[in-house]
Amino acid sequence: MISFFGVVLGVLAAILLRFVLMQTASSMQVSLDLKLILFTLVGVLIGGVTGALYPAIRAARLDAVEALSYE
């Protein structure tokens, strides 16, 4: 969820920055490609899921009593 919200906020910030740049600098052209945005979204979500699953699977293999007694 954190990865998804991070990407959404990043895309919104890029769109806002594009709008501001297009309004203030009339000679500057900024383009955002929808395919690149979607590719980034998928890549970040795959990375986020992979990064979250590895520790979760590792923790699931531990004995609950042993894991709770360790300090």
Image (cartoon, rainbow, N blue to C red):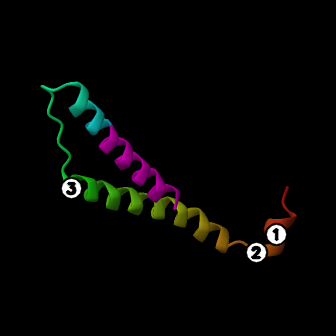
Q: Position of residue 47 (x, y in %)?
A: 42, 58
Q: Amino acid at mark 1?
A: Glu
The residue that label 3 is drawn on is 34
The picture places residue 39, in percent across and down from the top left corner, at 26, 58
Structural crowding at the residue carrying mark 2, measured as other residues with C-alpha within 10 Å and reported as few (<14), some (14–19) or many (≥20): few
Residue at 41% over, 54% down: 8
Alpha carbons under labels 3 and 2: distance apart? 46 Å
Whether residues under marks 1 and 2 lie with C-beta atoms below 8 angstroms apart, the answer is yes
Q: Secondary structure at mark 2?
A: loop
24, above or below 42, in the image: above
Give the extent of the magenta segment.
Answer: 1-16
SS assignment at label 1: helix
Taking the image as shown, residue 55 lies to the left or right of residue 19, namely: right
| Amino acid of disc 2 | Asp
Name the residue beneath numbered marker 2: 63
Q: Nearer the viewer, residue 45 or 20?
A: 20
Q: Classify residue 63 by image quadrant.
A: bottom right
> Among all residues in the image, which is located at the extreme front?
23
- Disc number at residue 4? none
